[in-house]
Every structure is written in structure tokens, then in C-alpha cells.
Amino acid sequence: MKRTILRKTAFLVVLAFVFTLSASADGGNKKLNSEKSKVEWLGKKVTGEHSGTIKVSEGSLMLNGDKLEKGSFVVDMGTIVCTDIKDDGYRAKLEGHLKSDDFFGVEKYPEAKFEMLKAKNLGEGNYEIHGNITIKDITKPISFKVNMHQHGNDLHVSGKIVIDRSQFNVRYGSGSFFDNLGDKTIYDDFELTLDLYLQ
């Protein structure tokens, strides 16, 4: 009787060990849940501002224990939506303009990408991220801060990125390229607020 119990116990221990190895075989690779995740954008001009959302189509983070080691994300530029304009016609006109060659040239450049090169742990789930961002096939270094913490079964990443569009040949209404724009000037910096969930 005791031998049978010991055998069953040993079997359960081995089974648990194998399951643990299997569960950690991906090396802590966390995949983006694109349905739950969102990115909000904010662009400003002399006379006001506009805001909206854009979707991250895929992404992943690699963790070694609790250490963030690398990651990459792909943004679907065709999903640019303006949320602050209520008039359907005006909203569609702005969205179309943002997708045109004046801005992000979505037909030719359907994706933007970010690749993390290193992360500095600042404590309490805060990280300073360094990497490369690619927009319109132009790649530039970028750094920003995020907070990463467990949210139920998900790993939640939040933070804000400020991007200078003039570095990516997005020139429309930019005072960096055109003189005498006056109140038609659109500021070069735009903001992305991250709300990402990974499993």
C-alpha cells in the first residue's frame, strides 16, 4: 500500500516537473494580445490638436526571469483612426489625409516597426527602453520609459513615446521644412500612449 502511494507521489512529482519544463520552454516569451491592446496617438497644431487610435498587429517580449531582455512590435498603419472628430465626413477626410503620401504613405508603407535593443530596470516595474523605430522605411534610435506589471493572466505594458515625425520624412505642415505656415503649422512631435497586453 505504502509502495503504491509512493509510486503515485513520485509519478505526480515527475509529471509536475515535466509540465514546468514545458511551460517555461519558450524562455519567457510573451506574445501580444492584439485584441486587448491599443495605442492612442495625439498630434498637435497651432490651432488645436487631434487624437485617435492605431493597432499593433503583432509583438512579443522576451523575459529571463523578471529581466526584460528584448522585444519587437509591428504597427498596422492602415488602422489609423481619429476619435475626437464627431462629423463623419470631416473625420474620414482627416484619416484619409493621414494615410496619404502627405503623411504616412500607408499604401507604400503599410507597417511601422519597433525593435528593442536593451532595457534598463529602474525598479518597481519601470524600465527605460532603448531601440530602433522604423517609419516609412526610415530607421532611427529612440528611447522611452514604460511600466510593466502583471495584470491577471496578462503582462501589461504602459508608457508614452514622443516621436519627431520630421525625422521620418513626414513633412506636411512642418515648420522644420516650410516657412510662413503661420497658424497652419503642425508640430513635429506626436505622442503615442501604450496600453499593451501580452500572454
Image (cartoon, grey):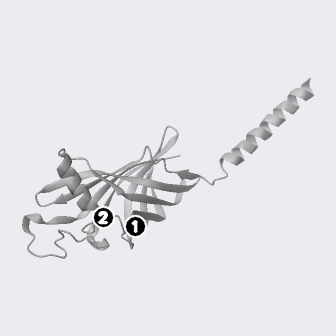
Q: Please tell me whether mark 2 sits on a helix, a strand or a loop.
A: strand
Residue 146 sits in quarter: bottom left
Classify the position of the N terminus by image quarter: top right
Residue shown at 82%/32% (left/top)? Answer: 9
Residue 121, x across and y down, in percent: 47, 57
Q: Which mark is residue 154?
A: none
Disc 1 secondary structure class: strand
Residue 163 - label: 2
**x and y percentages locating residue 117 in the rendered image:** 48, 67
Report if the CB atoms under discs 1 and 2 are less than 8 Å apart: yes
Q: Residue at x 39, y 64 (%)?
A: 112
**Residue at 40%, 57% in the rendered image:** 76
Residue, disc 1: 133
Q: Is residue 16 visible?
A: yes
Mark 1: few, some, or many residues within 10 Å (few <14, many ≥20)?
many
Q: In this rendering, would 25 be left or right of 150? A: right
Q: Is residue 122 above or below residue 152?
A: below
Query: Foreground: 31 or 65?
Result: 31
Q: Position of residue 56 (x, y in %)?
A: 42, 54
Which one is in front, 9 or 133?
A: 133
The disc, 1 or 2, on the residue closer to the chain's N-terminal end is 1
| Separation of residues labelled 1 and 2 (CA atoms) | 9 Å
Amino acid identity at mark 1: Ile
Please, is residue 109 above or below residue 58 in the view? Answer: below
The single residue placed furthest to the top in the displayed view is 1
What is the total number of numbered labels drawn onto the structure image?
A: 2
